[in-house]
Amino acid sequence: MHDGYFYNTERAPLHVNSTQWSVDYFVAIAIRLIIVAVFVWAAIVLVNMFVKYLNKHSRSEISPLDTAKKRLASGEITTDEFEELKKHLK
């Protein structure tokens, strides 16, 4: 039935004359799983490093009081409005 024309017996996961799985087949699967695991691990590490980098260099360091001071300096708000904002921010 399997003369090799439609069925490649050299690459079959089962031995042609038995029903037991080949050790080579399990080794090949294990190597592929290890390679995939390494790529997944590397992707997780890179994403984690990228998120830490973005958090470190984000602009969240500017406080609301600093923003109010800049608005006062640029003339967007008056000193009375600044003092009111300052009371609310503390």
Image (spheres, rainbow, N blue to C red):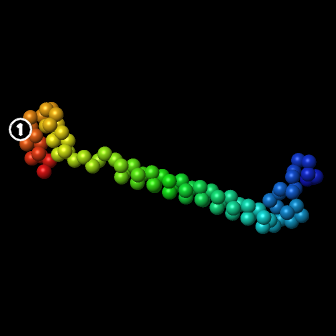
Tell me where residue 62 appears, x and y as whole percent.
Answer: 25, 46
47 or 73, which is in the foreground?
73
Q: Is residue 8 left or right of residue 29?
A: right
Badge 1 is on which residue?
A: 80
Q: Amino acid at mark 1?
A: Asp
Q: Does residue 4 appear in this view? A: yes
Q: Which quadrant of the view contains residue 14?
A: bottom right
Judge whether 46 appears above or below 86 on screen. Answer: below
Q: Is residue 68 left or right of residue 54?
A: left
Q: Nearer the viewer, residue 46 or 1?
A: 46
Give neighbour class at mark 1: few <14, some 14-19, many 20+ (Cα, 10 Å).
Answer: few
Q: Residue at x 55, y 58 (%)?
A: 41
Q: In the displayed orientation, state which residue is furthest to the left.
A: 80
- Please indicate, yes or no, whether residue 21 appears anywhere in the rendered image: no
Q: Nearer the viewer, residue 20 or 70?
A: 70
Indicate whether 16 appears above or below 53. Answer: below
Q: Nearer the viewer, residue 72 or 38?
A: 72
Rendered view: 21 above or below 75: below
Q: Secondary structure at mark 1?
A: helix
The residue sitting at 12% across, 42% down in the picture is 85
Looking at the picture, how far across and down is residue 34, in whole percent?
A: 64, 61
Q: Position of residue 84 (x, y in %)?
A: 8, 42
Q: Which residue is depicted at the point 80% across and 59% down? A: 13
